[in-house]
Image (spheres, rainbow, N blue to C red):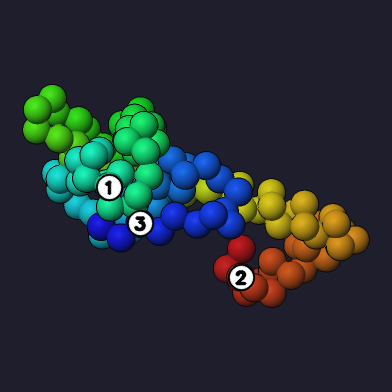
Amino acid sequence: MNIVISNRDDRPIYEQITAQIKEMIISGKLKSGEALPSIRALAKDLRISVITTKRAYEELERDGFIETVAGKGSFVAEQNGEAIREEKLKDIERRLEEIKREAELCGIDGNTLREIFDIVCGEDEI
């Protein structure tokens, strides 16, 4: 499993880990039932605190992406298509909010932003 931690990313390390594992699950790179590295092994591999990896795994479990079996480890949970779609929608909304804020900083109004979006998507696709 290839996880990259960036010091330039504004998000805490555990959130970077969580986001990357979620993306691997959603994209199908990690399959249902597949074992994840142990918390200690991932911490050692990434050269970070065990507490940080534990928090990432707890977030993933809370969100239903992984299941942890005592004494056996953590595994990719069976994925619900609707839950995956909802997760992607939340991500798109977050990114659109960032784009909106950036547009406002540049003096770009909502109508211009919609025009750009229409061009990017193709008017017949919206």
Label 2 secondary element: helix
Q: Which residue is mark 1?
A: 44
- Please report whichever mark, 1 or 3, sits nearer to the chain's N-terminal start: 3
Label 1 secondary element: helix
Give the label, 1 or 3, closer to the camera.
Answer: 1
- Image position of 73 with respect to 109: above or below: above
**x%, y% of residue 9?**
57, 53
Q: Which residue is mark 2?
A: 121
Left or right, 89 with reference to 31: right
Quadrant the C terminus occupies:
bottom right
Q: Which residue is mark 3?
A: 3
Circle 3 crowding by C-alpha within 10 Å: few under 14, some 14–19, many from 20: some
**Residue under the point 69% across and 49% down:** 97
Amino acid on which the number 2 mark rests in the picture: Cys
Depth check, front residue: 82 or 123: 82
**x%, y% of residue 118?**
69, 69
Left or right, 62 with reference to 38: right
Q: What is the spatial separation of the Cα atoms under label 2 and label 1, in whole angstroms?
A: 43 Å
Residues at marks 3 and 2 touching, judged by CB atoms closer than 8 Å: no
**x%, y% of residue 26?**
34, 52
**Residue 5, quarter of picture:** bottom left
- Please report whichever mark, 2 or 1, sits nearer to the chain's N-terminal start: 1
In the picture as drawn, the residue positioned furthest to the left comes out as: 72
- Please report whichever mark, 3 or 2, sits nearer to the chain's N-terminal start: 3
Label 3 secondary element: loop
